[in-house]
Image: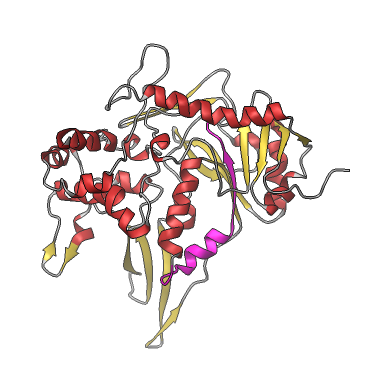
Amino acid sequence: MKSSKLPVGSYVRIDKPQLQTIVEQLRERGYRTVGPRLSEAAIVYDDIAGLDQLPIGYVDEQDGGKYRVQPSDGTGYFDYVVGPHSLKNYVFPPRETLLRCQLNEGQWQMETPPVSAEPLAVIGVRSCDLYALEIQDRVFLSEPYVDSNYEARRNSLFLVAVNCRRAAATCFCHSMKTGPAVRSGCDLALTELADRFVVEVGTDLGGQVVTHCDWGPCTMEEINQAREQPENLRKEMLRRQATPPPAATDDGKGQPRGRYLDTTDIRDLLLKNLEHERWEAVGHRCLACGNCTMVCPTCFCSDVEEVSDLLGQRVQRERIWASCFTAEHSYMNSGTVRKATTARYRQWLTHKLASWIDQYGVSGCTGCGRCITWCPVGIDLTEEVAAIRGADS
């Protein structure tokens, strides 16, 4: 008789259609199930009830300022990489009501709305985004200022991660030591083989959920295959980085060349080059649109605004995502501090890669590459850092 709970760290194999059982079991337990879906020519996170809603057989093509989804023969369930959405969209939503005010008979009544923290299961999370979630935990859960709304949503998460077996041209997680292998931070970790998944149990709850599948114990060969797959991809990413940035072109063999970020003494490198001429050059290209901050899985800036109805009888206080690329972000009583786009880009990059380390003891970048893909003019932070480093050496 099979166990009702598999121990943390154990490996089992399931046929690919058995992933449906995991989805159904989570829904029976009251979880809202979210996973990758093809919508408006992009692979995004959205509600799923079955495997037929996954973009099986599709791959994404990414480069600086470029994102395309196309069908591909022989691809698996999860051969696309990361899209514009991340876990940030769910634990730190783009817009959240903090307070409601209602005018009744000349008196204002205040109400703090309950936190929407329904149990949420996310299928298909990548290692870079698990690291991003850990970074956000440092921002929102560190004492003494704990964000109770974030905490409630964070505690309601069930994460089914996937070991990557393909990297986009914009991926550089190997540089940041955040992937492509899933190390921790999830309830279940899937490795996709030819006709089955190898499932590694990450938590006690994950061990309970997977037992509802028709599972079998893994052989040592299968475990080794599961471990070697992301490691082989890491080695391939190292091979591709031989071409210096900008490096996202085709090498004639159907494999995109990849990005790489040299993080050696990167904090001191950036902070002692605040007047480098490269900032001016990138400032002329940057549109200050804020796309990079919106798709970044770790950016956490926000603003609070009062939203009134037309009669002035109902007001909501809402927290919304903000971007350091806007004039309002650095506005003080004397006006906007960072007036030029050059200063705003420098603020973003030096915070992400340098002063973030001072604040939280870790870089604010996980190497997911979203900021490169979704920049309309294809600005590449790996290229910018390399240019500053080259002039500094």
Inspect the magenta stretch and tell me whether residue 61 lies in it. Answer: no
Q: Residue furthest right?
A: 1
The colour scheme is secondary structure
- Residue 97: % across, % down: 43, 67
Please give left or right for residue 386 compared with residue 13 in the image.
left
Q: Please report the residue visible at 37 percent of the width from the left and 37 percent of the height from the top.
A: 369
Q: Residue furthest bottom?
A: 106
For the N terminus, the quadrant is top right
Inspect the magenta stretch and tell me whether residue 156 lies in it. Answer: yes
Q: Residue furthest top?
A: 252
Q: Is residue 174 visible?
A: yes
Seen from the viewer's position, the closer of residues 22 and 145 is: 145
Q: Is residue 165 visible?
A: no
Quarter where residue 162 is shown: top right
The span picked out in magenta is 143-165
Q: Is residue 324 above or below residue 55?
A: below
For the C terminus, the quadrant is top left
- Residue 91: % across, % down: 48, 57
Quarter where residue 243 is shown: top left
- Residue 325: % across, % down: 23, 51
Q: Please report the residue visible at 37 percent of the width from the left and 77 percent of the height from the top.
A: 313
Q: Is residue 107 above or below residue 216?
A: below
Q: Please report the residue visible at 67 percent of the width from the left and 45 percent of the height from the top.
A: 9
